[in-house]
Amino acid sequence: MKKSGEAWTIAILGLLCFITIWELVARWLGPTKLPSPLTVFSGFVSTFNYSLRISIQGGGEGGFKPHIFYTVQRTLTGSFAGIAIGIGVGLAMGWSRRLRMAIELPLEAIRTIPPLVLIPFFLMWFGRGPRAQFSILALYCFFMLTINTLEAINNVRPSRLNFALTLGASRGQVFRTVVLPSIVPELTGGIRVAIGTSWGIQVVAELMGTPWGIGKVFELSRALQALDLIIIGIMWITILAVITDLTFLSLAKYITRWVPRVS
């Protein structure tokens, strides 16, 4: 309890120092180059349901709210689809040595390409809309989780596999009862990274042309030079990413509750 209270105290002090530095820099640069914390925090609340500046630029009458919902829906849909397919393909490659030999090298080669570089291709293939955004996120998460799953399978202790085989377990039983439970803790790290990065990729994809989304608000704000709206959008992305990460982390801890943890 004492350590927890100390951690919260340090975190709050760090946040106050950050806000103080922000205020000093804002006064030095001026409101046109960096809005003050008070301006941003007051706008954070007032622009959720309505913003005149967003409205007059064609961003709708609902303020940030419809754009937040759009970004959340697209980010979670695309990332979860890619994660599910990536884990499935990774497990199949871990089960079949021939399949792994056939597709591991092409996967490794394509994985090295930054996902943002591929955005123009998806825009030309699928147009400026949800399908392109979904495909970009799904592809990124697919490659990340496929490789992550393979690495997790490779990291399973040989002693566990040999022990199960010694007891007479079949290959399928070993894979189901030893390999799968062993890789779950390692997969959680890859999933967290994939989901966290997906928020940024989604916003960049929205900047390329879409009627809704926080990236769309960034585009409208740039035309108005409304830095406060851009900072508010960044705050929303940060909050959404943190909430998603903490939710998944709690779920992962429950699923892997048998794993010893350092307190």
Image (cartoon, rainbow, N blue to C red):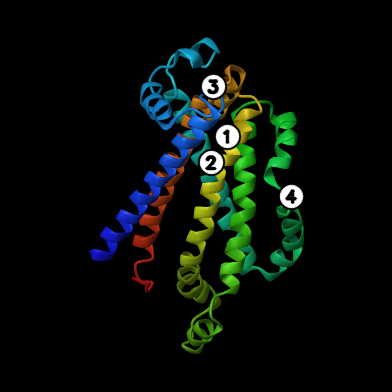
At a point 32% along the width and 59% down the height, the residue shown is 7
Find out whether the residues at labels 1 and 2 contact each other: C-beta distance under 8 Å: yes
- How far across and how far down the image is residue 246, in percent? 39, 51
Return the residue at label 1: 203
Q: Identity of the amino acid at label 4?
A: Ile
Query: Alpha-carbon distance for marks 2 and 3?
Result: 22 Å
- Residue behind mark 3: 226
Helix, strand or loop under label 2: helix
Indicate which disc, 3 or 4, sits on the residue closer to the N terminus: 4
Residue identifier under label 2? 199
Front residue of this view, candidates 153 and 71: 71
Pointer 3 local density, CA inside 10 Å: few below 14, some 14–19, many at least 20? some
* Figure quadrant of the C terminus: bottom left
Q: Residue at x 58, y 51 (%)?
A: 85
Secondary structure under the numbered disc 4 in the rendered image: loop
**Earlier sequence position, callout 4 versus callout 1:** 4
Q: How far is disc 4 from disc 1 in space, using C-alphas? A: 19 Å
The residue where tag 4 is placed is 113
